[in-house]
Amino acid sequence: MKKACLTFSDDYSKKSLDAMVPESQEEMKGVEVKISSDTSRIEIDAQDTITLRAALNSYLRWLNVSKEITDKYE
């Protein structure tokens, strides 16, 4: 298994992670994702490097989109 842990330090990320918890609970083949908005952390376990990279790209893209939308309306 391959593993990646991302920890964020800003309040913005905590709010965005709260919104992504339901997505992390969806079953994905070869991937297990745990999101903790309390610690602002995403943990991704994947069966191989390719799957890990795909999951990382998805979650980072969703965080980026969330930030862009929030910045636009603040």
Image (tube, rainbow, N blue to C red):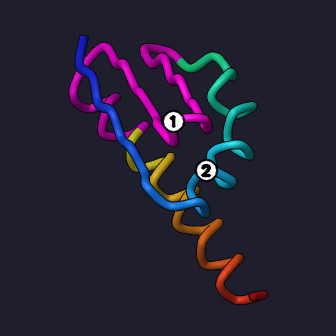
* Label 2 – label 1 distance at C-alpha: 8 Å
- Asked which secondary structure carries label 1, the reply is loop
Q: Position of residue 37 (x, y in %)?
A: 61, 38
Crowding at dot 1, Cα within 10 Å, few <14 / some 14-19 / many 20+, comes out as few
Q: Position of residue 6 (x, y in %)?
A: 36, 41
User: In the image, what residue type sits under mark 2?
Assistant: Lys
Point 30% across, 39% down: residue: 53
Query: Quadrant location of the C terminus?
Result: bottom right
Point 40% across, 26% down: residue: 44
Residue 62: quarter of image: bottom right
Count of picture labels: 2
Question: Which residues, given as a range, are shown in magenta?
Answer: 29-55
Q: Which residue is mark 2?
A: 14
Is 43 on the left-hand or right-hand side of 69?
left
Residue 48: quarter of image: top left
Q: Which residue is mark 1?
A: 39
The answer to which of 54 and 44 lies nearer the viewer is 44
Is 30 on the left-hand or right-hand side of 72?
left
63 relative to 41, above or below: below
Query: Quadrant location of the N terminus?
Result: top left
